[in-house]
Image: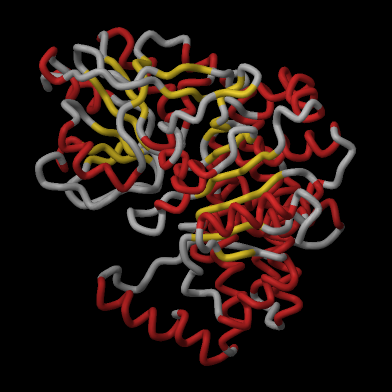
Amino acid sequence: MRQVAKKCYEDACKAAGVKPDTFTESHMVYTPPDFNADTLVQEGTQFGILKQRSQLGEDENSLLEFCYYGLKGMAAYTEQAFDSGAEEPEVYGMIWEIYDRLTTTRTVADLLELGEFIGETNFHSLRLLDQGGTQRYGAPEPTLVNTTPKVGKCILVSGHILPDIEAILEQAEPHGIHVYTHNEMLPANAYPGLKKYNSLAGHYGGPWHFQTFEFSEFPGPIVMTSACLVEPRRSYQDRVFCRGVVGYPGTVHIPDRNFKPVIDCALKMTGFEEDDISPSPPLTIGYGFDAWKGVQDKVVDLVKKGAINHFFVIGGCVGTDGEQNYYTKLAKATPPDSIILTAGCVKFRINKLNLGEIGGFPRVLDCGQCNDTYSVLKVAMSMADALKANINELPLSVALSWFEQKAVAIMWTLFHLGIENVRLGPTVPAFVSPNVLKLLKDKYKIIPIGNVEEDMATMLKQHAGGK
């Protein structure tokens, strides 16, 4: 990846008629002098947030951190798009421009402009990620996913990386091993190019933070393909396999896509036996933009007839219990003539609710991973075009849970696209200063979540001619 980026830089310089700077490997990789906890603590005192805040001031530091987190999230999406076979030199160029501007941009106004540019770049990264998945595996399609385990040997695959689960499915098939998705890997069940494998057995478990007891009970190896690994318990630590950037002491790291150690582990374990199995209702997924295009005319007709009067986007990164229950309560409070679009792992707060149907459509439409946010945005843009309205004029309300850096990248993308009245929760991130929060409210009309009943009343009133 570093060599690809270096070549893109050199090609861009050549095209511009300028001499590229010379970069060595040491310029491209940061390695602490002695990689241990004491050294990292010392580094933190020299370069950490508190030092930066003392140099810049609270508000400038707050926005700079906002940009840093957005860049990290966008870089993750870009890397995952590259892993799926989709890339554009122009996007790499935008990323290098962001790096350059981060070294000099310090005023509040300039940082806001930079943040929106990060959001614009992230929109292209999400587009590439969508392109990579659909070109490689076909467009996701509405699918009823089995959640009841099957008798037999098994592997559990968590995370986001579709090429990883593709390799596992292919290697597990000759051995008759059942492969289950976990957490954000759930949408893999909707891709035709992955559904073709008999080894794909369905989905097991809920959101990432349930994994300590779900992994303990799963009778086979677990593969983590991306972030969201919780410190494994000793009872299952030796059967956790990590890929890519994921790792933890005591787990096994798979350096490439040769999953023979995982296959061998699955064959040695008992797998699911008859007594382990209890029936569980299926999940409906696969309502990304490509599926939406085939039904949009019918949806628009239902809107014009008054059968559908509101759309809600409830998405983002799910956190632990407590305030995260807001999103479950919000979904339950939506009126029966409304549709919910969801993406990201917050879906596990609402995807088992029985909210009925409208015109043959489930009221909860699962659009995929947080990686599939592009699909949700395209659905909203397409609906705005079909109804000849500005996206902020649609009967559309957005409630997001922002829990990590990918969610911050998506927030900058929403700001770049001019999408207003986004409700954010469950809490305001610690890096957002009071003045910056006020600025975001004034400039982008973001709204911290509050009481479900009051929030719902306000959402419905906003799109009924009220304020």
Type of colouring: secondary structure
Image spot of residue 15 (x, y percent): 84, 51
Q: Inspect this view and state whether residue 450 appears.
A: yes
Q: Is residue 79 visible?
A: no
- How many numbered badges does the structure rendering display? 0
Residue under the image location 71 percent in, 36 percent down? 309
Q: Residue 453 vs residue 214: left or right?
A: right
Task: List x then y, in percent, for residue 416.
Answer: 75, 57
Q: Position of residue 31 (x, y in %)?
A: 40, 66
Instruction: Say if 331 sits above or below 407 in the image.
Output: above
Image point (33%, 23%), residue name: 180
Residue 372 in picture, x, y percent from top left: 59, 37
Residue at far right of view: 388
Q: Quadrant of residue 376?
A: top right
Q: Using the image, determine if residue 288 lies above or below residue 194.
A: below
Q: On the picture, is 174 further left or further right than 234?
A: right
Frontmost residue, 466 versus 200: 466
* The C terminus, quarter of image: bottom right
Quarter of the view holding residue 70: bottom right
Q: Which residue is painted at 15% across and 47% down in the image?
A: 233
Is the residue 90 above or below the residue 443 in the image? above
Residue 335 placement, left or right of 396: left
